[in-house]
């Protein structure tokens, strides 16, 4: 292979970086292990920064059916508090979003190889990166971008997730009354073993996506039905929201060992790590997609400007560290029984707190030129 860049992973970050590089005339091969985009564990909330970056990539979320989200509602054991979001936001299923991104990558001239999985990535004696695929094929390029999301490649593993988080996503059809009540809000529900989010997505569906610590899941017998019953018991608002709702998937989509709070410290020459491979923010912020786009944009700009991968990675870490730590602190607070008990009272006294938290946990900055054609 004679391409300049090898992109490993064709999710949000991989597609975004590939498009940015191809638009600047670089030859890119992107390898994605799924034959076609599928549902992923994700709350599917698109923040204002994410919408702006997607727009620069040529993707108009509204025309794909994205639903406007204007409010955030926090529901704990007894009470729910609502606040307007301090930025425009929408929700869109990942299947639709990823389909649009791959189509855009192809039209930008990226060579897209779907349904092929990279097994390992190693440095060769002639200073290239070599990816070995599951069928034994090898691809070589002077530069590689690691964009495999939550999945680690052999030899490039991130530290283990201490809390053993497990994530679930299920679509529901709510009743007309529940749909009207949820309206244009993203609802964050807190319970003893984690938190979940419920919000409308396209085609009249509601996305319920949650994370729980493994020991909480174990107490529910490691079964989704019992877990859902336990979360509803802990959070009556969730029980009310999902009462009689029709599940739209045979079983939830799941993911284990989410390394929340991870920020990559370093990388090797010629290997730019982006998206969840660069940083994993607690999911309640709804900022992961935005970070994936932001890191892709910065990495593409760094590569085009001749900035080495280790320098890029170190600068990215420094820039993202403060907000990542604030997001982690807030997530730990939500996980604390006392904090959960007092939160509704605090929000009654100062409803603006949710808006402030939403602003403080934004990691990304306004979009720059790297995505423009
Ligand atoms: C429970 C939960 C809820 C979330 N909710 C939100 C939310 O509401 N809003 C938000 O903005 N973010 C949310 N996120 C975060 C968001 O989903 C991620 O941060 C984002 O998808 C990261 O993008 P990425 O490109 O790094 O990874 P992905 O989009 O996951 O893409 C990685 C791609 O790499 C491919 N791949 C993996 N391994 C290989 C391999 N070996 N070879 C080839 N291809 C490979 C995968 O198939 C995948 O397509 C949530 C995350 C979780 C866990």
Image (cartoon, rainbow, N blue to C red):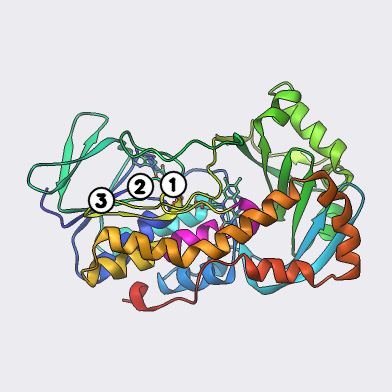
Q: Residue under circle 2?
A: 9
Badge 3 marks a residue whose secondary structure is: loop
Whether residues under marks 1 and 2 lie with C-beta atoms below 8 angstroms apart, the answer is yes
Q: Quadrant of residue 109?
A: bottom left
Q: Residue at x 44, y 46 (%)?
A: 149
Badge 1 marks a residue whose secondary structure is: loop
Q: Is residue 240 left or right of residue 363?
A: right
Q: Quadrant of residue 167?
A: top right
Q: Residue at x 78, y 69 (%)?
A: 353
How many labels sit on residues?
3
Q: Nearer the viewer, residue 72 or 348?
A: 348
Q: Residue at x 32, y 63 (%)?
A: 312
Question: What is the CA distance from the residue labelled 1 to the residue labelled 3?
Answer: 18 Å
Q: Is residue 165 above or below residue 135?
A: below
Q: Residue under circle 3?
A: 268
Whether residues under marks 1 and 3 lie with C-beta atoms below 8 angstroms apart, the answer is no
Find the magenta span and give its range.
282-294
The residue at label 2 has a CB less than 8 Å from ligand 1: yes
Q: Residue at x 68, y 52 (%)?
A: 331
In this rendering, which labeled residue sits more in front, label 1 or label 2? 1
In this rendering, which labeled residue sits more in front, label 2 or label 3? 3
Q: Which mark is residue 7?
A: none
Q: Residue under circle 1?
A: 149
Q: Is residue 208 left or right of residue 148?
A: right
């Amino acid at each position: 292979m004679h391409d300049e860049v090898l992109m490993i992973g064709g999710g949000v970050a991989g597609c975004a970086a590939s498009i940015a590089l191809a638009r600047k005339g670089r030859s890119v091969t992107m390898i994605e292990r799924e034959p076609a985009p599928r549902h992923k564990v994700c709350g599917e909330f698109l923040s204002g920064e994410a919408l702006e970056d997607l727009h620069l990539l040529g993707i108009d979320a509204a025309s794909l059916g994205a639903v406007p989200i204007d409010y955030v509602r926090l529901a704990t054991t007894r009470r729910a508090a609502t606040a307007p979001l301090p930025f425009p936001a929408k929700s869109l299923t990942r299947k639709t979003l990823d389909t649009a991104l791959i189509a855009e990558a192809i039209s930008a001239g990226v060579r897209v190889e779907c349904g092929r999985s990279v097994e390992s990535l190693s440095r060769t004696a002639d200073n290239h990166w070599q990816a070995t695929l599951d069928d034994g094929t090898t691809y070589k390029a002077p530069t590689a971008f690691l964009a495999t999301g939550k999945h680690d490649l052999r030899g490039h593993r991130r530290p283990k997730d201490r809390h053993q988080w497990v994530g679930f996503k299920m679509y529901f059809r709510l009743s007309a009354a529940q749909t009207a009540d949820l309206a244009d809000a993203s609802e964050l529900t807190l319970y003893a073993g984690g938190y979940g989010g419920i919000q409308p997505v396209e085609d009249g569906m509601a996305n319920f996506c949650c994370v729980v610590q493994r020991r909480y899941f174990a107490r529910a017998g490691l079964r989704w039905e019992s877990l859902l019953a336990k979360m509803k018991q802990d959070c009556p608002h969730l029980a009310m929201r999902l009462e009689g709702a029709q599940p739209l998937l045979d079983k939830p989509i799941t993911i284990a060992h989410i390394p929340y709070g991870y920020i990559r410290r370093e990388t090797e020459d010629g290997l730019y790590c982006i998206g969840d491979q660069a940083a994993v923010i607690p999911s309640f912020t709804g900022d992961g997609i935005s970070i994936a786009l932001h890191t892709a944009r910065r990495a593409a700009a760094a590569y085009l400007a001749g900035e080495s991968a280790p320098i890029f990675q170190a600068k990215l870490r420094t820039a993202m560290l403060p907000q990542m730590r604030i997001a982690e602190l807030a997530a730990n607070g939500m996980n604390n029984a006392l904090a959960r008990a007092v939160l509704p009272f605090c929000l009654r006294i100062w409803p603006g707190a949710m808006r402030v938290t939403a602003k403080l946990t934004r990691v990304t900055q306004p979009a720059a030129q790297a995505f423009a054609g």
